Image (cartoon, helix red, strand yellow):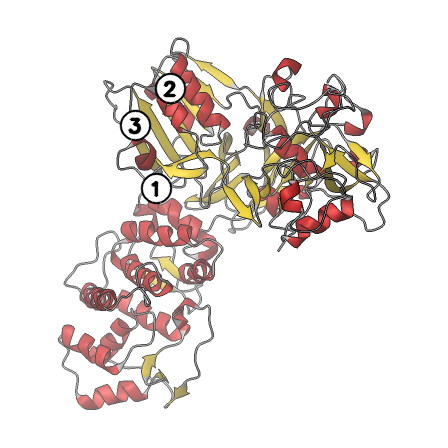
Amino acid sequence: MPAFLGEYPTPASRTIRSNRAFNGELRLWEAAACLEGDAIDEATALALRRHLDMDISPMAVQTLWQSNTLQAGRLSWSIQQRAERLNWLSGAERLDPLKPVPAESLIGRSLGFWRQHYTRERTRRRKRETTLKPWHKTQADRELGLKEALLDLWDRPERAAERLYALFKAHQGKPFKQALGKILPRYYPSDLYNPATQKSQYIRLPWHFYKLSAKARYLYALMGLAGKHLKPHGQIRPSGRLGLPLGFIAGLGGAAIMVSLTTLGTSEAPQFQLTHGVFDHPIFSQFTIREWYRSGPEQYRYIVGSPKSLESGVASAGQELTLDWRWQALDNIKILNGAQLWHAGTLPQPIRACAEHWPRRSLAVIAADPETDIAARQLAIRLLDKGAADVILLGTAWDRYLHRLTGGAAIASPQDQLLIILHSTEKLPPLADFPGAVAAVRADDFEGLARSLQFPGERSVAELWDGNSSLRLWGGPENEEVGGIQLVKVCGGTFSMGSPEEEVGAQSNEQPRHPVTLDTFAIGRTEVTEALYKTFKPLQREFGADHPAVLVSWGEARAFCQHHGLDLPTEAQWEYAARAGTLTPWSSGANEENLKASAWYGEGLSGTAHPVGQKKANPLGLYDMHGNVWEWSRDCYREDLYKDRNVELTTIDPVLDRIACEIRSLRGGSLDDPAEFLRSADRGWRRPGGGRGYGGFRCVRAPRRQP
């Protein structure tokens, strides 16, 4: 990676003599060379001089070469030296920052040279590309793309915003993205640059920030251009309480956000005071939207909430914002005149998609009458239950209420996506400016579209429904295999753990019901079978290769999972996976009649465990979470465990695991138990040294705890 990216140490260099100031064309030549972020060789420097048609004597060339730092014979400058020369170049021609950089200007001609130079380099690399030495989409390819985008930053700021953001988004959390985060804060548009206060390593760009489009300004703010002046600051943290009545979708309620402003009397960006620090946890942060950016001189806009409910407001520089962000129940459906806003389908706590770089918000429009078009309703339910859409606008008058869906310019982001589904004869009206990805799909078979949303992971609209859009769809959890164990990836989120007092069969050890937030994990599609367990060690008793392994102690079960780099699920992970977005006693609903299709139970002690995967799976595609055999969890059992948990805040990834643990938790019930023992919230227990005839286990992979 080039040294200018700042990720790796600069190679040892030698200084021929101390730098001195140059005048005339020699200084212009040196400044133009600094547009290349890396060290340059002599041949390239001389080619630049010829391109600029400069009349510089050989002695002057030698003086330039001897008066700067060399890296392996290549001309190089420090960050401060480069900034000084580029700032001089930016101001030398007195360009109007409100007009485009003229192509015939010195900056324009210099940029033209470096663009040609990078194009030739890309062509040369592609011609030499082989299977053993690839070029396309390699680190070197991306580094060259970054150099090209940084050139655009000088004279094509709108285009540069798109190109830089594509690199920024594609490599979040990696060294390349981190390096980009070190570069952009050093660049300042002319209307934000103050030579009296700006440090010498900052670079002035020849254009005004507030003349850019709202989309470009937003992208630059996200990426950190001009450091603290534009970068979204702080993290707005929620605090709260939980209200989860049935028939409503549970979520972070935007209407419950309370903001108070206090003037601090400074020109710095606003500061946030959080009412509860528990929500500062990075696991919780990934499931919320907490942004703010500069929207004008001395003015900032904040956006807070969840993908299903967002609020926006304005604060002035120097103000302190105290935030109280509460949990509350949201109406599943909001009735409008000729349309409806849906936040959930059949699942009150749907599990959102967790594909890499999944949109900040995934929004959808279905142009059909929700009262009469049953297929359109089925499609909306499928999109919401799968986690493919966060909110859906369903109705014939959808264009009248599109702003209610997107939030308008104040909330909509380039990181959002919007899917519009129309009947084949319907025309797409002009859309208000939406900064994110948009795709329109025309079809008459809405029921067929709903059926097609049955696949693991993500696919593009073009791949699934034809067309040319790269807008993304989510068909359900992704699958993987570890040592013959089939795992289902369960996207993280916050859910209601435990049972309400009014639930039939509820026990005191399941109460109070409280919010729990989990990171993404992968869990066994079925209990571990005899065939799989016997590859690890013999069983005490066998019933069949595809039967669950039983009569296995807690220690033996955990040893098997850890042998494969996995572990036993925590109680919270098990219940979250068993509920699969539901709040009812069983994932199949509140009616015991529906349980019969998905669980073995009530057979008495005379039966034997059934082969795995014979009954209907739950909404996540997991089998036998209810009934057949009890399943070990990782936790020690404690009767009053939930009494210590806060029903107003959230508990992050809880686990109670001690070496000297006399009792371990069991979950799920078995084939000889009544239906109330199979409830998602039910907690059983047993001493870890003993297995039981109807006791088995499944394994889990949790990124935060397992290698």
Q: Do the residues bearing badges 1 and 2 touch, measured as CB atoms within 8 Å?
A: no
Q: CA distance from mark 1 to mark 2?
A: 38 Å
Secondary structure at badge 3 equals strand
Sooner in the amino-acid sequence: mark 2 or mark 3: 3
143 vs 160, nearest the viewer: 143
Residue 567 shows in the view: yes
Where's residue 558, x and y in %?
72, 48
Q: Residues within 10 Å of mark 2 (few under 14, many from 20)?
A: some
Residue lying at the far top of the rendered structure = 372
Question: Residue at label 3?
Answer: 441
Sooner in the amino-acid sequence: mark 1 or mark 3: 1
Residue 318 shows in the view: no
- Mark 1 vs mark 2, foreground winner is 2
Q: Give left or right: position of 636 versus 561.
A: right
Q: Residues within 10 Å of mark 1 (few under 14, many from 20)?
A: some
Q: Residue 196's image quarter? A: bottom left
Q: Is residue 173 above or below residue 387?
A: below
Under mark 1, the amino acid is Ala
Under mark 3, the amino acid is Val
| Residue 334: mark in rendering | none
- Mark 1 vs mark 3, foreground winner is 3
Where's residue 461, x and y in %?
33, 34
Question: Residue at label 1?
Answer: 214
Q: Residue 506's image quarter? A: top right
Under mark 2, the amino acid is Glu
Sooner in the amino-acid sequence: mark 1 or mark 2: 1
Question: Residue at label 2?
Answer: 447
Secondary structure at badge 2 equals helix
**Quadrant assignment for the C terminus:** bottom right
